[in-house]
Amino acid sequence: MKGNYYKSKYGYQVRFGRDICLHAANIQQAERILTGLRFKEDEGTFDSRDYKRGNPLGFEQLAKKWLKFKERTDIKPTSLAPLTNYMTQAIDYWGPTNIKAISDGDIEDFLWMRDDISSKIRANMRSGIHQFWKWVVRREKIPMPDIPTIPFELGWRNIIDIDTQQKIIEKVWEISHHINPKIWLGIRFLATYISIRPGELIGITEQEVNLKIGAIIIPHPKEKKPKITYLMDDDIEIIKSMPTGMPHMYFFRHPKGIPGVKPGTKFGVHYLWKWWKKACAELGIENVDLYGGTRHSTATALGNVCTPEEVKDATGHSSKAFERYFQGKASRAKMVTVKIKKLSGAYQHLINISEDTNIDKRLIFK
């Protein structure tokens, strides 16, 4: 029969194949260990990794390896941070437990152990755990557990009509253009180019505002593939009128003269939102956030004047060879952008403004 045990200096050693060497305090324990190993092999469930030093199938060890693996991919820091948070909680819960010993019920208990989180966060945690287990299954060739689905509903965002939207954007210009006209421009873009999300917008660099093709290129959007959003001619003229920086510099960056802010740093994640809220407060408008008041409100209004296909084009598209789509989808997307500007009822004009704004010309609402 396979395996045997031998007397050693400190008790007994149980040898099973070339990989397994276990310690036993006495002969009775050595016999029980050997019998258990033989039973596992006869049963067809023997796995030498379960008995190796270093606990290679321990949950904690695998979880840390997975996070290292994610760091080596193109995942954004903002996406890695919540995964790290979820796995840290899981490590505290399961520790070095062999991952094959974690049952479906154990996973369900973990996901529902906290009652102080929303259903959306719980669903995100479930998604992270599911990603981890898929990686383990591929890497270690173990069965995939049945991870329970977490139902949730997204909260509704309040939207506004286009006239109200444009009044807010005009107010943003009024209260912020002397500080940095790109505050107004950023909010204007979010209301006009509904393919761009706020986080994507503030992350673009000078080189990603490509005026040769008249487009903003988002290299790493949520959709995973590069996204191209084509600009209207008047917006191209606005951008041309502004001072340019080095290609690697953020387009939406802070200028000199703002206390406590280093010149050249990009807008913070809540910067445009704060100015939107200031404008709303001055106009007496409540409970409308930046995302709902710009992108969602514009997309809703488009439903009255555009076909579903046109709205789909306006949300942007990805392509490894965008030239193939330029004449088709891009032209339709521009037509939708024209409709957006007609909806606003705002006609733009370039006017000269004072030199202390560091821009020769600026487009404002008349």
Image (cartoon, rainbow, N blue to C red):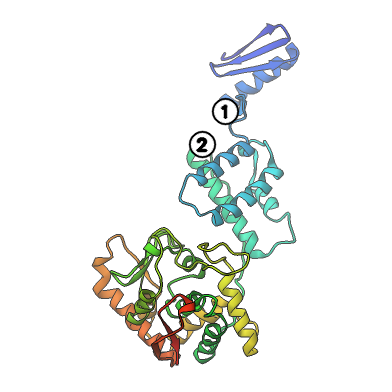
Q: What residue is disc 1 on?
A: 49
Q: Position of residue 334 (x, y in %)?
A: 33, 80
Residue at (64% x, 44% y) in the render: 103
Please say if the residues under marks 2 and 1 sit with CB atoms less than 8 Å apart: yes
Mark 1 burial class by Cα count in 10 Å: few <14, some 14-19, many 20+: some
- Quarter residue 306 falls in: bottom left
Q: Which mark is residue 297?
A: none
Q: Which numbered circle lies on residue 140?
A: 2
- For this rendering, which residue is in front, 266 or 280? 266
Q: Amino acid at mark 2?
A: Glu
Rendered location of residue 347, percent (x, y): 40, 91
* Residue for point 30% across, 60% down: 320
Question: Residue 105: x, y in percent?
Answer: 67, 49
> Camera-side residue: 320 or 354?
354
Say if 90 sits above or below 293 in the image.
above
Which image quarter is the C terminus in?
A: bottom left
In the picture, the quarter occupied by the N terminus is top right
